[in-house]
Image (cartoon, rainbow, N blue to C red):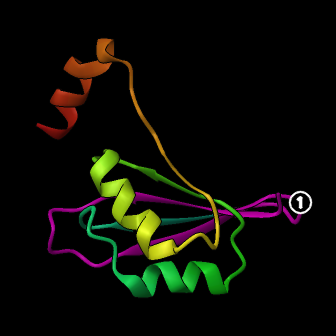
Amino acid sequence: MERWAFIYTSGDGDSAAVSATTGSKQCELLTVGVPSTAVDDAIIEDLIEQGIELLELCGAFGPAEAAKVVEQVAGRVPVGYVTYAASEAAGLHQLFG
């Protein structure tokens, strides 16, 4: 895999998306912080145009929210989302309320 993307929630619902790229020629990571799990179609399209081969989601993306992104991607790249064990609920609650 040469290029993949990680979309995470990073705001209060009103802020703009923020992007960064890191890695090497062998494996480049494009990160996009979005204000909510409602990911703008333009963000998805831009990542696909940049040649991502895989898309990961994190930060409040559960099965329903991930399914919406899967629908937006329409099979062009695999989409996954980060999950946490039930034992981590207290820490997540402290972070996200």
Q: Which quadrant would residue 27 be assigned to in this image?
A: bottom right
Residue 31: percent from left, percent from top? 53, 64
Q: Amino acid at mark 1?
A: Gln
Task: Write the residue at 10% across / 36% down.
Answer: 97
Task: Write the residue at 28% across / 52% down.
Answer: 64
Is 63 drawn above or below residue 6 in the view shown?
above
Residue at the right extreme of this rendering? 26
Range covered by the magenta-colored residues: 1-29
1 vs 51, left or right, is right
Residue 35: percent from left, percent from top? 25, 67
Task: Write the residue at 63% across / 73% down.
Answer: 76
Please tell me how crowded label 1 is: few (under 14), some (14-19), or many (20+) other residues with Cα within 10 Å.
Answer: few
Q: Which residue is mark 1?
A: 26
Assess whether residue 66 is covered by the magenta stretch: no
Residue 24: percent from left, percent from top? 83, 61
Q: Nearer the viewer, residue 97 or 83?
A: 83
Q: Could you say whether the residue bearing mark 1 is in a helix, strand or loop? A: loop
Assess whether residue 5 is covered by the magenta stretch: yes
Is 81 drawn above or below residue 44 in the view shown?
above
Q: Which quadrant would residue 10 be assigned to in this image?
A: bottom left
